């Protein structure tokens, strides 16, 4: 099967030029002006951008949390991702305490098998790391799970102590893998939360008000210190505030291999969006929480200056009905997480490119190329080059779109960005050369997505 994309403006992290792209057997075969080749399918991209498919390295599909399970599974979640121009995700397999990582990996393979519409990989969430199981991490790397996530938050559930984190970092330094950290001081937050509940402060907004920015900054600083002591690189997930950003900037100025992502919710929403009557604020309960609005521009500057290298979604949706409602009368019972897998490229294009905060190249770099590089998918993913997978999006910069629960494809009963207008949207999406989105229709098949064994961080950056 072959496809020719003609007359497009190709945008990668480094380049911006007019050319045709010839695709054969799922790979980019040739790039050039006015290619004279025979193809089974011809797509005219005149007036549109041709970009590498988005790579979202932080999703939680079919994930148990807080007595329920995130409402997008690997079918609905990956189809929604494709509508938004994302053609690869890395989801989080979660090790249950007292079990081996292999058990978790097997469970997550079964969750994705026969359902994923785009290619996918896995990180491993580590919750239990006795010395006898440290080699489980090496086994995961051999299986292509080349990154691990640990938590400084959620005591008695996901949280690890500093000694365990240090042990894990020492091992990732040896194997070339990358450790991802949820950095919030969970112990202190728990004390603040209990005090709020005792004072009768139970509304959803108190989820945000009991998780101060200082608690995030302290944990980021501690993460960096542990990484420095262990000789390991580290990646801070979902960084939300300037206090934490300053800690990352300081470490990077010293030349330390410290990286961080932020998410659209922290760039486009703030505490100003909370304080609604009733239980509406539960839609915006996730961790870290929303911050004061002035942090937004600091994060945008961090993206521009490369203090932040990636924008991912932390897509972990729970419906308001019967899921978020578990927390009526007690904000600690609200499942943490929000939907966003479908709208990352749209939002970053509107807020970044259209509003002149970042360039076209930087947009592609943040949403596709750097996440692919950092997590061992490059150059197979994250670029348009001969030999790369033909994960390609034809992007219409003039297409106007209003984000709403009425038109999104995620299996959640609200939108965090309800009514927000964007200009620029995916028109045609190809995954390994197969057209899976055409116009506003999904024409792929659930289950066509492949598990991708990833290289190590050291294998790409070393």
Image (cartoon, grey):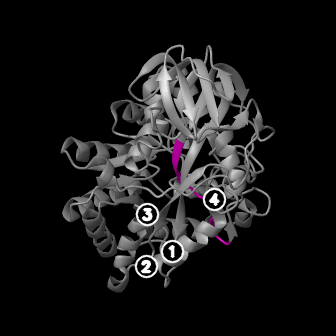
Disc 4 and disc 1: Cα gap in Å?
15 Å
Residue drawn 56% across the image and 17% down it = 36
Q: Report the disc number at residue 61.
A: 4
Secondary structure found at label 2:
loop
Give the distance between the C-alpha atoms of the residues marked 4 and 3, in whole angstroms. 16 Å
Which residue position holds label 2? 128
Give residue 360's position: percent from left, percent from top: 47, 23
Distance from disc 3 to disc 2, alpha carbons, whole Å, reads 12 Å
| Residues under numbered marks 1 and 2 in contact, where contact means CB atoms less than 8 Å apart | yes
The residue tagged 1 is 95
In the displayed structure, would residue 217 be above or below residue 440?
Answer: below
Instruction: Please give the residue where the numbered disc 3 appears in the rendered image.
Output: 149
Mark pair 1, 2: CA separation: 7 Å
**Mark 4: which secondary structure?**
loop
Task: Please give the range of residues in magenta.
Answer: 55-67
For label 3, the crowd category at 10 Å Cα-Cα, with few meaning under 14, some 14 to 19 and many 20 or more, is many
Chain-order first, disc 1 or disc 3: 1
**First of labels 1, 2 by sequence position:** 1
């Amino acid at each position: 099967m072959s496809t020719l994309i003609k007359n497009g403006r190709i945008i990668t992290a480094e380049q911006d030029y007019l050319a045709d792209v010839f695709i054969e057997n799922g790979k980019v075969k040739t790039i050039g002006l006015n290619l004279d080749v025979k193809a089974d399918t011809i797509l005219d991209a005149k007036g549109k951008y041709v970009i590498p498919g988005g790579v979202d390295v932080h999703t939680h599909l079919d994930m148990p949390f807080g007595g329920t399970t995130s409402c997008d599974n690997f079918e609905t979640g990956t189809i929604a991702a494709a509508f938004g121009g994302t053609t690869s995700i890395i989801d989080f397999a979660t090790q249950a305490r007292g079990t081996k990582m292999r058990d978790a990996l097997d469970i997550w393979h079964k969750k994705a098998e026969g359902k994923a519409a785009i290619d996918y990989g896995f990180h491993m969430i580590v919750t239990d790391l006795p010395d006898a199981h440290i080699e489980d991490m090496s086994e995961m790397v051999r299986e292509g799970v080349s990154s691990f996530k640990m938590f400084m938050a959620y005591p008695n559930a996901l949280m690890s102590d500093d000694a365990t984190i240090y042990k894990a970092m020492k091992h990732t330094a040896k194997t070339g893998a990358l450790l991802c950290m949820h950095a919030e001081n969970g112990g202190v937050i728990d004390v603040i939360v209990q005090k709020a509940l005792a004072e009768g402060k139970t509304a959803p907004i108190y989820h945000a008000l009991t998780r101060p920015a200082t608690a995030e900054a302290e944990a980021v600083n501690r993460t960096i210190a542990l990484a420095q002591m262990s000789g390991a690189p580290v990646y801070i997930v979902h960084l939300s505030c300037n206090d934490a950003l300053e800690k990352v900037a300081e470490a990077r100025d010293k030349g330390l291999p410290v990286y961080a992502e932020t998410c659209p919710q922290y760039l486009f929403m703030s505490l100003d969006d909370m304080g609604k009557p009733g239980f509406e604020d539960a839609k915006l309960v996730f961790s870290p929480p929303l911050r004061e609005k002035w942090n937004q521009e600091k994060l945008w500057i961090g993206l521009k200056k490369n203090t932040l290298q990636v924008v991912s979604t932390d897509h972990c949706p729970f419906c308001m009905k019967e899921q978020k409602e578990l927390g009526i009368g007690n904000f600690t019972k609200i499942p943490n997480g929000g939907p966003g897998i479908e709208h990352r490229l749209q939002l970053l294009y509107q807020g970044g490119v259209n509003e002149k905060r970042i360039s076209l190249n930087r947009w592609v770099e943040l949403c596709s190329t750097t996440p692919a590089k950092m997590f061992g998918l490059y150059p197979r993913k994250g670029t348009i080059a001969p030999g790369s997978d033909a994960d390609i999006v034809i992007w219409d910069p003039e297409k106007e779109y209003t984000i709403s629960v009425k038109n999104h494809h995620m299996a959640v009963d609200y939108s965090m960005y309800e009514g927000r207008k964007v200009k620029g949207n995916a028109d045609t999406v190809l995954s390994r050369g197969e057209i899976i989105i055409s116009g506003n229709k999904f024409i792929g098949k659930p289950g066509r997505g492949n598990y991708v064994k990833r290289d190590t961080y050291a294998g790409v950056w070393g």
